[in-house]
């Protein structure tokens, strides 16, 4: 993987999460990963918008919304996710 394609997890924290259509979902508060393989499992959403609060998505023990990392389709100034993959 070329060096410019690698991202440090701290670079993702605090980024705004949006859908392909531009709907804002919240911000990345944390990242859940499998310790043995290093596989990224979920983004933990903070400051969730009312829109995503209404969806019945998986939540952690504190009630934060979990977004499957597999739904992420682009990373830059925002994290863009495929809404179809989470609902």
Image: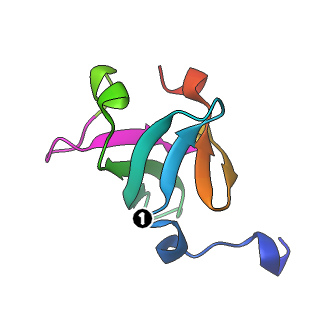
| Nearer to the camera, 84 or 58 | 84
In the displayed structure, 30 sits above or below 9; it is: above
Q: Residue at x 64, y 72 (%)?
A: 7
- Quarter in which the N terminus is drawn: bottom right
Secondary structure at badge 1 equals loop
| Residue 20: % across, % down | 66, 33
Quadrant of res 58: top left
Give percent across and percent down for residue 53: 28, 29
Residue pictured at 52% horizontal, 33% vertical:
23
| Residue under pointer 1 | 14
Q: Residue at x 51, y 66 (%)?
A: 12
Residue drawn at 54 percent across, 41 percent down: 18
Q: Residue 72: where, in percent of width, then height?
A: 61, 44
Above or below residue 23? Residue 45 is below
Instruction: Tell me which segment is drawn in magenta.
Output: 59-69
Compare residues 13 and 24 and report the one nearer the observer: 24
Q: How is the image coloured?
A: rainbow
């Amino acid at each position: 993987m070329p060096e410019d394609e690698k991202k440090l997890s701290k670079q993702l924290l605090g980024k705004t999460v949006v859908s392909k259509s531009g709907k804002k979902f919240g911000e990345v508060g944390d990242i859940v990963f499998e310790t043995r393989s290093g596989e990224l499992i979920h983004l933990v959403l903070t400051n969730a918008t009312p829109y995503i609060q209404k969806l019945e998505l998986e939540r952690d023990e504190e009630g934060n919304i979990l977004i499957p990392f597999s739904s992420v389709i682009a990373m830059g100034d925002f994290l863009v996710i495929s809404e179809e993959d989470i609902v």
